Image (cartoon, rainbow, N blue to C red):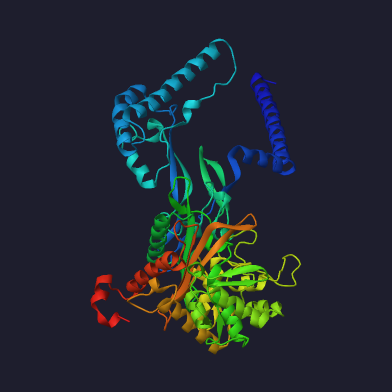
Amino acid sequence: MSKQKKRKVILARYGLIVTGLLMFAVMIVFSAGKIVFTLEGKKWREVGEKETVIRDRVILPKRGNIYTYDGKLLATTEPLYSIYMDFWADGMVKDTLVKYVDDLSKELARKFPDRSALQYKNVIMNGWNMREKEEHQIRDNEARGIEKRVSLRSRYVKILRNDISYVDLKEIRTFPFWNQRSNRSGLIAEERNARKKPFGNLANRTVGSVYKDLDKGGASGLELKYDSLLRGVPGVKFRQKIQGKWMDVVETPAKEGWDIVTTIDAEIQDITERALREKLIETEAESGTAIIMEVKSGEIKGIVNLDRMSNGNYAEGNPNAFSYMNEPGSTFKTISVMVALDDGVVTPTDSFHVGNGLYQYNRRWVRDHYWRRGQDRGYMTIKEGMEVSSNIVMSKMVLKGYEENPTKFVEGIDRIGLRKQLSWDVPLSGIEGTSSIRFPDDKDNYWSRTTLPWMSFGYESQLPPIYMLMFYNGIANGGKMIKPFIAKQFVNDGKIVKEVQAEVVNPKMSKESTREQIHEMLRGVVENGTARVVASDYFDVAGKTGTAQIAAGGSYANNYFVSFCGYFPAEEPMYTIYVGLRKPKGVPSGGGMAGMVFKNIAEQTYLRKVHLTVEDCKVDSTLQK
């Protein structure tokens, strides 16, 4: 065989060997791939995902808004930003920072004057100095072969004490040095959602509050009561590395919370708050509440709860309209008279002897407010007793009809609907927001021989202001007692999901003849009696005063709760108002204190509705009584 042929044979054999080896290598790769992508594919895909995907991050939903009846924002959610600097930013240069730090500090001091320009400069330069110390520590550790990790505190230095709005964020991004890309300026804006009240503290206790961490939800008021609707439903996202960059990928979108449209009228709310605050300051009272509702609809248009703070100022604190659990005093007399008239025990013209204002029953004295004068007033009718708020007339009236059967009297109160336990738009605890009226057979509450007469003029029972408002509004509403409410509409994605109508507590509180007689008596209280100061030049008022001693330690101290509840205009009622003041200084007067707040609220609200000023009304004879 020639050398050339031998060479061809060798090359052919070599080619076969190489081809065989290549085929064998392909088979190995194929087999390995099969193992990886079939038998162990799931395992390795999971490993891959772990390297490129961070899963299951919560997307917090936008909390729903709370509105006034006409669409003004009472509470909304807006982003706020905490401002930091990262002094390890890749493109940050010391010389550039030093060049612009004075100008930056001056702009910050101008915009946020809680620090001086020098203080801002110190904060910023201290951050840079901290970075240099950290760099030195890192180099020193490397030189000494120490693997201990250095904590880089200069990566996250807070510059502004308080969080700022998006508008302010846009502005500070135009400031010297911060007007660069973030990798050069080191500017970090950490976003969080915060609750904002555009009207400030208006209806603050009713609207309520949320925790600073919005994810924890509502803390009080409507925010807490309807938290499950307002908070929305969280979504889910994951971060994925795509072409070397981390990006958010939404897996399940968050669902925004529902909006709530309330019955509150911002202007009436403001009128109510100003009127109550002025009287609280004048009388140095401990606290007070004022509520105004529409007669026909049951919608609360204004509700104010003010407590005196430790600094002497008044602010929204407790839900007094619902949580005041005082004995109501003489505003309860209207309830007693309604029961007695309905049962046929008396008529408005029936009279009882009141004498000099002192009456002893079962070794306890019942006193009328004039008893110290020693004046003998002889006999007084039921109507007159209501007008001058006689405790003796009320006591003798209920003893005449119910002394032998006090259960029947309490059943009459029950018949009106005042012992019903109701729920409200504001979250409460314990007995708050409920009536507490004794029943003779109730083993938990001691019933004595004097309970009945004392109950007739507003002691031995507890009704929060909201119940008294509801009762008087029922008289104004033709005998139909409806529950006052605040949350009117629930809106989801722009559509009304639920619209609330007033709950009817009692369609007929009493006989119509009884209601009409009560109505005339309440007008008489304002025209001839204890509420003469409440009378208005612009409309007639019907209502009742109340002055009750506050029990403390099993006895009655020299502290009072004064109140007035009524409605206007008396002939065609539009609004019912309740006002209560706790522990005012001076001579306690339901008419002169609470009644004057009522008058102020009523007149301003009425004038607002007819679009006239007080001066216009004074010269317009058509508005005179």
Q: Is residue 571 left or right of residue 31?
A: left
**Vertical side of 32 occupied by 369: above or below:** below
Q: Quadrant of the N terminus?
A: top right
Q: Is residue 83 left or right of residue 216?
A: left
Tell me residue 398's x, y (percent): 63, 79
Is residue 470 in sight in this rendering? yes
**Near-viewer residue (400 or 206):** 400
Q: Quadrant of residue 530?
A: bottom left
The one of 202 and 30 positioned closer to us in this rendering: 202
Q: Using the rendered image of the protein, determine whether residue 489 is visible from the camera's viewpoint.
A: no
Instruction: Residue 405: name its quadrant.
Output: bottom right
Quadrant where the C terminus is found in the figure: bottom left
Q: Give coordinates of residue 101: x percent, y percent.
A: 32, 27
> In the picture shown, does residue 246 fall above or below 208?
above
Give x and y (percent) for residue 226: 56, 61
Quick one: which residue is furthest to the top in this view?
Answer: 144
Q: At x 70% / y 28%, what residue is drawn?
A: 17
| Residue 533 image position (x, y, % from top left) | 38, 71
In the orientation shown, which residue stands out farthest toward the left? 619
Task: Return the residue nearer the eye: 229 or 555.
Answer: 555
